[in-house]
Amino acid sequence: MDIQVLSRKAEGLERRLQISVSATRVAEAKERAAKRVAQSVRLPGFRAGKAPAAIVRKKFAQEIEAEAIDQLMREAYESVIESEKLEPITQPHAHDVKFDDTQALTFELHCEVKPELALERLSGFRVTRPNPTVTDETVAAQLESMRDQRATWAPVEEKPREGDMVTVTLAVADDDGTIAEGKEYRLVIGEGQAISAIEEVILGLAPGASTEQLVKWPDDFPDEAQRGKSKQVRAALSEVKRKTLPALDDALARELGDFESLDALTKAVREDLEANAVREADAAARGALLEEIIGANPFDVPPSWVKQLVAAYAKAYQVPEGEIEQFADQFHATAERQVRRDLVIETIAQRQQLAATEKDVDEKVAEMAEKRGADVSQVYAALEKAGRLREIERGVTEERVFAWLLGQNTVEQA
């Protein structure tokens, strides 16, 4: 055979294949490459494509060899992927390439392949679904939050207290004791936007006043290097604003939406919270069932996919460059669980023919348009532009997969 796999090594999902391309095929590839080069180059004294082959091979030996190797390795890769029935998920890399005019071409191909999930056990599990209860206290807290969103802030000429919004300029001494120019901050006292010791300094100031005090950083400060250190802090308070909440009455209900009274708003809030509680209880049961399945069906996870997911979350969270490594360490386990979850759902969807079709997506978009009272084509175009059609497809597929799984297992109510 012109192309042979001499050896195979597997480490998890990584594959290393030693590949050989026969000397005959190498010679043929070099001949073809030489002809192509000869047709495209110009040499003094010869018309384009008419230079003697021997001269072309000598003068453009490196170009001919590079083209021949490139072509041979592509052909070998395609042949081996098909014959070995591999499904690479990363760009393959060639190592230890050996090439000679009179010998075979040999190289080692490295790639990462998609895992094959056996999923031998998908039934017989028993999980508990939380009881989706909504209390009067929960409703009251939600109404208070909505009331807080309509709050107004007005300046006061007195020292701040907890819950006040302050505008303050803060400067912290360097390790050598030098205090640089301060930076202005706007924060709400008591919401953890500054360490408690600095809040204590601010609470002692009236608008227009300033101070310089020694402040100790807490022992649990996120930056370990700063824990327990004492530094001079200069603070200048320029403004204090106090929040005024609107009355929780019919007028506020009408302001918050199409509600005739506070009772109507309260009813709508309760119904919304109850619907959300049901969704969360369902999600908890699904998550618990998926964890049981993953635990009973171990499989390798592609490291490259985990890294890609970590990178995507780091970008979404706008993690600073200098903190990405730390973020990756902390988020790795979460990303790996997500990849496992997605692989299980995808595999079940394929085997049970549960994957969403284009028609399913169209129906879902039509449903969304009806709820919004909007034109279907406009909603579809907006979702397509935002890149959310794939998200809808995944959502429909997941619903079907979990419906199937719930039919194979037992879910008990807490």
Image (cartoon, helix red, strand yellow):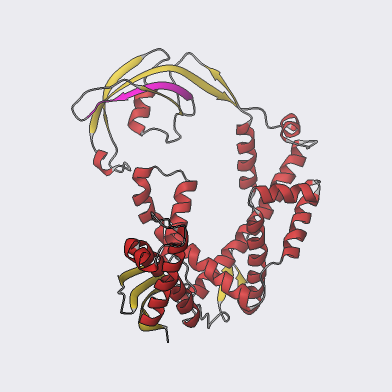
The reply, left or right, for residue 358 in relation to residue 53 is: right
The reply, left or right, for residue 413 in relation to residue 241 is: right
Is the residue 298 above or below the residue 309 in the image? below
Is the residue 60 above or below the residue 178 in the image? below
| Residue plotted at (58% across, 81% down) | 123
**Could you tell me residue 325's position as x and y percent?**
34, 51
Q: Residue furthest left?
A: 176
Principal SS element in the magenta part? strand
Which segment did they paint magenta?
Answer: 165-174
Determine if residue 123 is in view: yes
- Could you tell me how many numbered marks the image carries? 0
**Could you tell me residue 208's position as x and y percent?**
40, 12
Among the 4 quarters of the image, the one containing residue 110: bottom left
| Residue plotted at (24% across, 41% down) | 225
Q: Quadrant of the N terminus?
A: bottom left
Find out whether residue 172 is within the magenta segment: yes
Foreground pick, 330 / 328: 328
Is the residue 207 above or below the residue 65 in the image? above
**Could you tell me residue 114's position as x and y percent?**
48, 72
Is the residue 140 above or below the residue 363 in the image? above
Determine if residue 336 is in view: no
Q: Residue furthest front?
A: 45
Among the 4 quarters of the image, the one containing residue 71: bottom left
**Could you tell me residue 288's position as x and y percent?**
54, 68
The reply, left or right, for residue 389 in relation to residue 211 is: right
| Residue plotted at (45% across, 79% down) | 80
Foreground pick, 393 / 399: 393
Foreground pick, 391 / 131: 391
Q: Quadrant of the C terminus?
A: bottom right
| Residue plotted at (64% across, 53% down) | 388
